[in-house]
Amino acid sequence: MRFPDYRPRRLRRTEALRSMVREVQLHPSDFILPFFVRHGTGVKIPINSMPGNFQLSPDVLLRELEEPVARGIPAILLFGIPAKKDPVGSEGYAKDGIVQQAVAKVKKAYKDLVVITDVCLCEYTDHGHCGVIKAGDVDNDSTLELLAKMALSHARAGADIVAPSDMMDGRVAAIREALDEAGLDHIPIMSYAAKYASAFYGPFREAAESPPKFGDRRSYQMDPANSDEALREVGMDVDEGADFIMVKPALPYLDIIWRVRNTFDLPLAAYNVSGEFAMIKAAAQAGWIDGDRCMMEALTSIKRAGADLIISYHALEAVRILQGEQASPRKK
Ligand code: PBG
């Protein structure tokens, strides 16, 4: 097709025409909205580096869920801030842990909402690493047992999906086995299959109070320079029984989303992480970009790259815009 026979601008002339030939459209059901829960009642503590996000006690969480549920967001992802941290992250798999309590309350109030729980020890360990420390590094195989216990306790509390984000080798198989043995073979696993050692998690670590006290996560999370390895990582999790696969972060890794999409046919989630969110918010606050338009463009790019589901702190604001309203009702 060559100019002047083909004139691409013919189909861009009006919004109606553009909408007829639009290849990718965001929908409320594409989104998963993350929340941070902590003990107490009436607690709503703002997270500095993530404007509009809070640490919430379960009762406040129930209130905050009204709007996203009413607007058709199908799922939430829960992270917990425990009362006490220790070397083995005991509250992570305690029956009365904060996530276990919150899940039970949420499922009671909103039985159709899909509640996904993050399975990882870093929020619960006093050293802030995602597993048990032996000889100065995270020990893979002894961590698997704890992750399996944690996933099991989330599922028993009522979680609909468990999402391991620790990046230990073999954790999907270990969790699948534990769930199946306990008669929970109907609970799906959404694995953070290709998760990179990313500086874009910075604001999250403030939100979840989970920065590592020494070293970093490079001995278990992936090297940002690798993409063949991402396919091997995802392939392993698929073989081990993952029901959903995930790429994380999203925006600096759109090529990985694209490669994974073209290699595997499982439902694919992408995590638009805290630092990606914070960059847009900060630049918008400074008046340097149009935050709402940049947000919608970024989210569209994640879907265009091949993600079926987008985990995003922008989810509620984006859905408001999709439904013809202002992103933030508090803003004049
Ligand atoms: C826990 C976990 C992290 C994120 C999700 N689960 C932090 C990390 O790996 O350090 C990051 C999410 C975000 O930045 O929004 N392991």
Image (tube, rainbow, N blue to C red):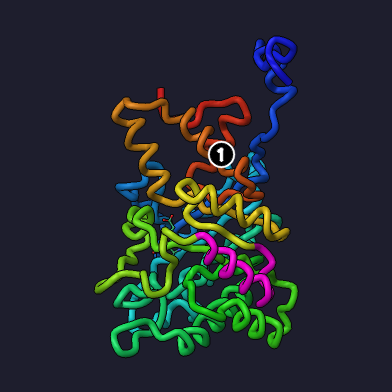
Tell whether position 178 is magenta.
Answer: no
Residue 261 picture location, percent across and down: 65, 53
Kindly identify the residue that appears in the image at 30 percent across and 77 percent down.
Answer: 126
- Which segment did they paint magenta? 227-244
Quarter of the image with the N terminus is top right
Amino acid on which disc 1 is placed: Ser
Q: Quadrant of ligand 1?
A: bottom left
Magenta stretch: includes residue 239:
yes
Percent x, y for residue 178?
64, 85
**Which residue is most to the front?**
2
Label 1 neighbour load within 10 Å: few <14, some 14-19, many 20+: some
In this rendered view, identify the residue nearer to me: 41 or 274.
Answer: 274
Looking at this view, is 234 or 291 the one in front? 234
**In the image, is residue 16 above or below residue 35?**
above
Residue 311 in the image, given as x and y percentages of width and height:
55, 51
Q: Which residue is mark 1?
A: 301
Is residue 90 shown left or right of residue 245? left
